[in-house]
Amino acid sequence: MVMAHNYVLLWNWLDGSLINSVSSAVSCILYSARIYGNTIENMVVASGTVFNQVLLWRLLGSKEEDCVRVNITLKGHEGVIFGVRFSECLSKVCSVSDDRTVRVWALPEDWTGQYERVVLSAQLVLFGHEARVWDSLMLKECIVSIGEDATVRLWSYRGDCIGLLEAHKVSALLQ
């Protein structure tokens, strides 16, 4: 479980016991996080920060005092990060933000988390939502995004909006 100040609690769900607590060397408030991997040895955390960045770090990464170093920083958003997704093979990360964009980041081919604070720029910036973007999903054929503007958009990996579904406006229901 990723906590709001960029640390992870590892639980044994069978008996409810805490196995371990792992902190990132960058302790900041998160708006989103995602874990990729199925063992502690290969788990990667993507943390979406209030400082418009995505931080990538491994649970068993290099230590800096009692914390794990951030390996890769993804910079380029102009708003807080509301969602982060990994591609199936960990070659890309997709992030969505308050700045109304969806960004796709290509990770180095041999990425094993051994990098020392590499900063990457987005490979693709998708703009079309008229309000904040809440989440995304990377499929083989396209990227799907959903926004506060009550739209679902389908994007090609070339950056074209190839589909749009307008949903019912629900703002009055949320008041």
Image: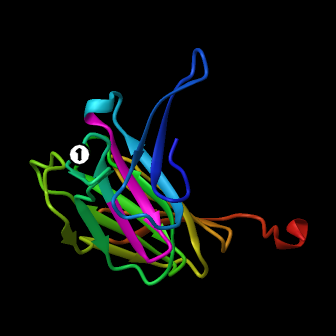
Badge count: 1
User: Residue at point 37% right, 70% down?
Assistant: 103
Q: Residues within 10 Å of mark 1 (few under 14, many from 20)?
A: many
Quarter of the figure with residue 22? top left
Left-right relation of 83 to 36? right
SS assignment for the magenta stretch, majority: strand
**76 on left or right of 117:** right
Residues in magenta, as a range: 42-55
Image location (x, y in percent) of residue 87: 32, 47
Can residue 52 be found in the magenta stretch?
A: yes
Residue 73 at x, y = what percent?
28, 67
Which quadrant holds the C terminus?
A: bottom right
- Residue at 68% across / 68% down in the picture? 150
Q: Residue furthest left?
A: 110
Colour theme: rainbow
Nearer to us in this view, 82 or 58: 58
Residue 27 on image: x %, y %: 43, 64
| Image height of 150 relative to 15, above or below | below
The secondary element bearing badge 1 is classed as loop
Residue at far front of view: 65
User: Looking at the picture, which amino acid does disc 1 mark?
Assistant: Gly
Q: 134 above or below 112?
A: below
**Can residue 175 be seen here?**
yes
Residue that badge 1 annotates? 61
Q: Nearer the viewer, residue 88 or 35?
A: 35
Q: Is residue 86 magenta?
A: no
